[in-house]
Amino acid sequence: MPGITSPQATVEYHARVDSDGTDVVTFNATADGEVSSLHWFVDNRYIGVSQPGVPLAWKPQPGRFSVRVVDDRGRSDTTRLFVALVQ
């Protein structure tokens, strides 16, 4: 079963007002040895695919989100994400 290690529900992430597109939130998860791919979703919108232990960068926007990862066996994990807009 996958386990999300980042983002963490207890951490407030930031997006800068004047960002030039370089702000990212890193998505990462652990998975069982037989898993070769992890599929990432933010509020049920597909974001991309990564390998277990390999981070996937997401360009943040302000708000509260649900982040879900699904492994290639159909098992999933979910966490909450809060992104604040900062100067």
Image (cartoon, rainbow, N blue to C red):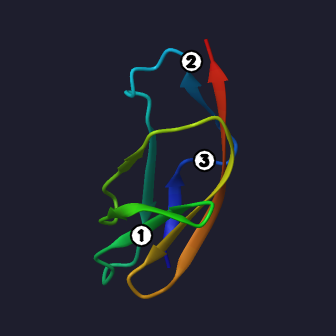
> Earlier along the polypeptide chain: callout 1 or callout 2?
2
Give the residue number, with chain letter if any, for mark 2: 17
Residue 39's label in the rendered image is 1
Residue 10, given in percent of the width and then of the height, sits at 70, 43
Describe residue 25's horizontal placement relative to residue 15 as left or right. Answer: left
**Label 3 sits on residue:** 8
Quadrant of the image occupied by residue 43 = bottom right
Q: Residue at x 59, y 67 (%)?
A: 44
Task: Give the spatial CA distance, label 1 vs label 2.
Answer: 29 Å
Give the residue furthest to the top.
Answer: 87
Q: Nearer the viewer, residue 51 or 31?
A: 51
Q: Image quarter for residue 58?
A: top left
Image position of 60 with respect to 79: above or below? above
- The residue type indicated by label 2 comes to Val
Q: Amino acid at mark 1?
A: His
Three-letter code, disc 3: Gln
The image quadrant of residue 47 is bottom left
The earlier-in-sequence mark between 3 and 2 is: 3
Helix, strand or loop at mark 1: strand
Could you tell me how far apart the alpha carbons at marks 3 and 2 are, in whole angstroms?
22 Å
User: Do the CB atoms of the residues marked 3 and 2 lie less than 8 Å apart?
Assistant: no
The image shows residue 45 at horizontal and vertical percentages of 54, 63
